[in-house]
Image: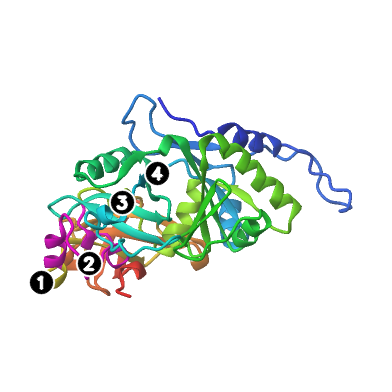
């Protein structure tokens, strides 16, 4: 079984409405006929871990190229059914979080946003979090499959504090806007536009900004019962204003993400990885805050050692595109006998002439920038050079 999005019908109607005549009165001599209807494609997000099944995420509305172009030139609208929400209320909620997550959150002010990991006592990831704080409550934005477990882990560490923790993923729904015109569209909707790493509250719409794909990016969270109304409001305002907005799917957004070099939880790293392996260590971990579960492991590795593997970018010698899971070998392993890593994400990069953009988890022995490796792509070993991800640089 799968769990359909509350926006499924609206998106399918949009695809069906694309079947319209091509004649244009103001363009004499233009081609005529019928436009072929867009054919939407959906994919299940993650494992089926309960009776309702995984959420369905739009893969494409029919044209990945046009969807990618909207991200880069105007505004792309994503039905983000893969995101979940954990809500914390009570006077002690920031104090509790600060003792449990890797980022310093006890000093957050109303409207602040922070990124953090929740670890086990061995220093390995349990969940990847975006912390959204207001004076009334604090939200955790995370992969929907980790919401219930994260709420349970926090609840288990609560001993008399004034904190109420709840997984509210089913009653909240996410819509994302990505692109240079997304700010103008939000303004045209009458919503307060947050700055980077800030959150605003607008009459039932919670909005925060995280630029993940090289352009302004916003998440809009509303009650699930209001998601369809917000989706239609975006459509109406975009048509009435000078903003261009196109519905996009995961394929186009993922292409822009990989091209930008932005690692993603549960794809490039996941539960069981160490923070030092993820490529986003300095964005998620504070090395000046108080204790939290797993801190000793994180600090010891950062100050005295290194991880066994780490996420890196790979610059390939030609245009062959390796798939996720493709093995990575040392550059001098002529027989390709001993894999030292694997590709985690890959996509053509239109801003670089559609050359492959690739990220992979590799052994520390080949992780130094400039190291030559070979990657399996289209049935052969392709030469490549290791590069450090921009997200892995200490600010």
Q: Which residue is mark 1?
A: 304
Q: Quadrant of the C terminus?
A: bottom left
**Dot 2: element:** loop
Q: Nearer the viewer, mark 2 or mark 1?
A: 2
- Tag 1 or tag 4, which sits nearer the N-term? 4
Q: Nearer the viewer, mark 3 or mark 4?
A: 3
Judge left or right: residue 84 versus residue 38: left
Instruction: Report crowding for label 4: few under 14, some 14 to 19, many 20 or more residues within 10 A (C-alpha).
Output: many
Q: Position of residue 119 (x, y in %)?
A: 21, 52
Q: Which residues are magenta?
A: 273-301
Q: Which residue is mark 4?
A: 85
When the figure is inspected, residue 355 is found, relative to residue 139, above or below; the finding is below
Q: In this orientation, which residue lies closer to the viewer: 172 or 259?
A: 172
Q: In this orientation, which residue lies closer to the viewer: 141 or 53?
A: 141
Residue at 66% across, 55% down: 190
Q: Is residue 47 magenta?
A: no
Mark-to-mark CA distance, 3 and 1: 33 Å
Q: Position of residue 108 (x, y in %)?
A: 36, 63
Mark-to-mark CA distance, 2 and 1: 18 Å
Label placed on residue 93: 3
């Amino acid at each position: 079984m799968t769990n359909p999005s509350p926006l499924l019908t609206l998106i399918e109607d949009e695809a069906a409405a694309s079947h319209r005549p091509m004649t244009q009165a103001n363009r004499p001599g233009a081609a005529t006929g019928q436009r072929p209807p867009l054919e939407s494609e959906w994919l299940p997000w993650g494992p089926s871990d309960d009776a309702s099944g995984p959420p369905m995420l739009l893969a494409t509305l029919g044209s990945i190229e046009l969807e990618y172009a909207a991200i880069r030139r105007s505004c792309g609208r994503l039905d983000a059914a893969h995101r979940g929400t954990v809500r914390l209320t009570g006077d002690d909620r920031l104090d509790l979080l600060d003792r449990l997550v890797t980022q310093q959150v006890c000093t957050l002010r109303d409207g602040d946003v922070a990124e953090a990991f929740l670890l086990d006592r061995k220093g390995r990831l349990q969940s990847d979090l975006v912390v959204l704080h207001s004076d009334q409550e604090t939200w955790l934005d995370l992969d929907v499959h980790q919401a219930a477990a994260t709420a349970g882990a926090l609840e288990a560490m609560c001993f008399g504090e004034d904190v109420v923790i709840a997984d509210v993923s089913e009653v909240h729904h996410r819509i994302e806007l990505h692109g240079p015109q997304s700010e103008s569209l939000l303004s045209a909707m009458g919503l307060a536009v947050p700055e980077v790493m800030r959150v605003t509250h607008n009459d039932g719409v919670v909005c925060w900004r995280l630029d993940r794909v090289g352009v302004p990016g916003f998440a809009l969270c509303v009650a699930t019962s209001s998601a369809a109304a917000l989706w239609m409001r975006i459509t109406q305002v975009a048509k009435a204003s000078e903003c261009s907005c196109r519905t996009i799917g995961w394929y186009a957004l993922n292409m822009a993400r990989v091209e930008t070099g932005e690692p993603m939880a549960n794809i490039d790293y996941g539960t069981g990885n160490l923070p030092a392996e993820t490529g986003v260590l300095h964005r998620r971990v504070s090395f000046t805050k108080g204790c939290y579960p797993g801190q000793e492991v994180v600090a010891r590795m950062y100050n005295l050692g290194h991880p066994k593997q780490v996420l890196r970018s790979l610059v390939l010698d030609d245009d062959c595109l390796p798939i996720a899971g493709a093995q990575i070998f040392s550059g001098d392993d002529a027989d390709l006998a001993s894999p030292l890593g694997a590709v985690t994400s890959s996509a053509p990069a239109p801003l670089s002439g559609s050359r492959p953009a690739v990220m992979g988890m590799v052994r520390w022995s080949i992780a130094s920038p400039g190291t030559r490796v070979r990657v399996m792509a289209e049935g052969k070993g392709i030469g490549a050079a290791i590069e450090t991800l921009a997200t892995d640089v200490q600010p």
